[in-house]
Structure formats: C-alpha cells, structure tokens
Amino acid sequence: MMFKLPDLPYAYDALSPVISAETMRFHHDKHHAKYVDTLNDLLKASGETPASLEEVVKAAAGDPAKKKLFNNAAQTYNHTFFWTCMIGEKQQPQGDLAAAIDRDFGGLDKLKEAFVTESVNHFASGWGWLAAEGDKLKVLSTHDADDLLTHQGLTPLLTCDVWEHAYYLDHQNDRKAFVEAWFDNLPHWTFAAAQYDAARGKGQAWRHPVPAA
C-alpha cells in the first residue's frame, strides 16, 4: 500500500496569474511529489501499513523519533488540501459561511485583513489557515509542516501556503502581494462551506485519499 500523488483538480494554468503554470509544475510535480515519495519510503522501511494519512500524521506528531515521518506526512496532507481548497474561478462565500464571516470578523474585507496579517507576519515557512471550531471561525498559522490535524477541535476551511517556494517565481519576496491576490481570487468558497458544515456536524469533513495497492 502506497500513497499516490493526487492529480491537480484543474489545469496547471487555471490559477494564473496569481499562481503561474510554471510554479504549479514545480510545486505539485516536484515539491509535493518528493514529500509523497519520502513518506512512502519511510513507511516501507518501518513496515507500517496505515489506513489513512491522517492516522500517520497524528501518530507521528510530537514524537522526536518520527519527526521526519511527521514532516513528510503532514506536508503531503497540507499540499493536497491546498490544491483542493482553491479553484480557477472567483467565488464569494454564501449562506451560513457568509453569515459566520460577518458575525466573527465583521465581513469579508475584515476576514481578508486578518488572514493576510496572520499569513504575512508568520515568521519563515508555514501555512495560513481559516478554520472552524464548531460554529466559530478562526484565523491562525502553523509553522513548517504543522497542520490542523494536531490541533484538536479545529476543522480547516482554507489554507494558503506561505513557504517561499509557493510564490517566489511569481511574486519574488512579496509575500503580502501573493496572499492578498490569493485571497481575492483563489479560495474555493463552496468547498470551505462544506467544511464549515462538517465542523458543525453536517456531513463529513475532507480527508486525504487513502493509500492504494
């Protein structure tokens, strides 16, 4: 049983000009693929046959002896979620999620301000997240490979990769311009709404594809 590199859910150029096709080919086909390959090598060496990627991440979290496994498993998860929570056509939040954004942030512009500030001010590599804790929305960031699987009670709705390789070809060192353009154009708000429903007990939250034979 091995984890496979999931195909992108859109064409390489679908997120351009915020994320170019060149960046997508390097980021997905090389960076993400390397995490998947290393993850599989580590699992094979240890004789582990997990049923899910989420299981691997949670079991390895906080164990110094499994730091490399955690990093590669969590980065595999994070990247697949990242591709999934974006879409190549501009959307706006609707329904219960839109109402929650108004309640918890004072509107989409205020959410953008909070998300950009958190993501830009995160020191070094990491991820910016919009998450739900029950019906309450939160903005937070995680460092390096860390993700919300290690934060009990939080359901991810959206994430933006703020590792430099995610934006340097297109935006050089201007992380703020990247995150602002990302927030304005790429969030898959329909997906985020389904995640928000799941956080409140309405349906199942997204899970990474299981390993295949």
Image: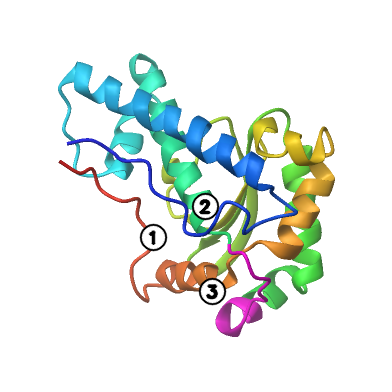
On screen, residue 194 above or below 114: below
Mark 3 closeness class: few <14, some 14–19, many ≥20 residues within 10 Å: some
Quarter assignment of residue 203: bottom left
Membership of 1 in magenta stretch: no
Q: Secondary structure at mark 3?
A: helix
Membership of 90 in magenta stretch: yes
CB within 8 Å, label 1 to label 3: no
Question: Over which residues does the magenta segment extend?
Answer: 87-99
Q: Position of residue 124 (x, y in %)?
A: 71, 27
Q: Position of residue 13 (x, y in %)?
A: 63, 54
- In the rendered image, which residue does mark 1 sit on? 206
Q: Nearer the viewer, mark 1 or mark 2?
A: 2
In the visual, does 169 lie left or right of 37? right
Quarter assignment of residue 86: bottom right
* Kind of residue indicated by mark 1: Trp
> In which quadrant is the N terminus drawn?
top left
- In the rendered image, which residue does mark 3 sit on? 190
Q: Position of residue 88 (x, y in %)?
A: 62, 64
Which mark, residue 83? Answer: 2
- Identified at 45% across, 47% down, the residue is 80
Q: Nearer the viewer, residue 67 or 90?
A: 90
